[in-house]
Amino acid sequence: MKITRIDQFFPRPRTRLVKITTDNGLVGWGETTLEGKPKSVHAAVEELADYLIGKDPLRIEHHWQHIYRSAFFKGGNVLMTALSGIDQALWDIAGKYYDAPAYALMGGPVRDRIRVYAHWGIRDMTDEGLAASKARLEHLQKSGYTAYKSGPGGKWRAHEPPAVIDAFVEQAYLMREWVGPEVELCFDFHGKMTPGLAIEICHELKGMRPMFVEEPVPQENVDALKQVSDHVPFPIATGERLLSRWEFRQVFEKQAVSYIQPDGSHVGGISELKRVANMAEVYYMHIMPHCAIGPVALAACMQVDAVVPNFLVQEQVDFSLGAGLVEEDWKVVNGYIELPTAPGLGFAINRAEAEQNREYAEELGGEYFYAQDGSVADW
């Protein structure tokens, strides 16, 4: 069996797909979404296709090593996203070849279903804003979600006045009031804060007992991350912008967080996601794979969620559940998705919807923020 062609599609905002076809008709799908850098990843996949065409798709580890190690410059978000999508597609082919879910080829499942959390929050305290937040919560509760993630929106400076901090804290406590103590709430700071500001806000939140705070500070400085963890009385998480086991190494060795959030479409695909999870287990860290893009990425994450004992909960957003790109949407029941049993990544693609290309427009992750004085602000 040989790879005969590699195609790429942009069927939805924040959804970039790669399709690998073999000479015996088997097809594998992966997701290469990197918000704000679609042309760069597209070019990277095209370059990697020159190597992959004519190769055996079942040599997944060999291809991973070649793509990562054969160039003088390694890693980076563009290459690792391209590698991630290709790796996912190769696992999809392998599962279909052996007529088994990809997780069955990794030792088999250690759980029967995957716990997921939804995105929900309160950011507008007007009557209209509160009504919209309440309506979304009620919609999500029908699926039985038991965990939700929100966060402070917009740009934040090195420090903000009490009114800004108090507004976010008020929203967080109102969320707790609405859902009660049986539901877990978490907050994504998107790396917007300085250590001092993150610690201050976390202490304001401690009374409502968050499940975790994600990326309180930018990911580049592990010591700053550990400083926050050491001064906060609940779990801190990070990892969506760490791109391989080597980038997670210091986080592990310094015990800088409680939970890690590698992204299956950025960290190096299914292969590297599992390796990172296995490393984390040694440090008693649980994984909560990041996934804020499409259903192929979610399917890839769930293959690893199924087989690692230190899995905690899986992120997903509304369109991760299908959005018409797969023949049957993932179903959330009582806060869980049942393990897929179909071969490969567990879905049948809707080719009519998936094999499309749309014009790129600015989307979440591709916009820019500037502070009031005109200086650049972190996303």
Image (spheres, grey):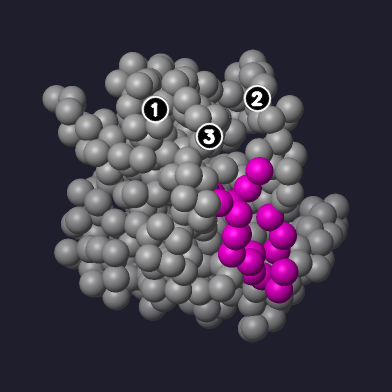
Taking the magenta stretch, the answer to whether it contains residue 343 is yes
> Mark 1 belongs to which amino acid?
Lys
Residue 369 lies in the magenta-colored region: no
Residue 86 visible at all: yes
The answer to whether residue 368 shows anywhere in this view is no
Callout 2, which amino acid? Glu
Quadrant housing residue 233 = bottom left
Marks 1 and 2, the one that precedes in the sequence: 1
* Mark 1 Cα shell of 10 Å, populated few (<14), some (14-19), many (≥20): some
Name the outermost residue toward the left: 72
Q: Nearer the viewer, residue 45 or 28?
A: 28
Q: Amino acid at mark 3?
A: Leu
Circle 3 residue: 26
Q: Is residue 19 above or below residue 201?
A: above
Which residue position is annotated with label 1? 2
**Residue under the image location 71 percent in, 36 percent down:** 350
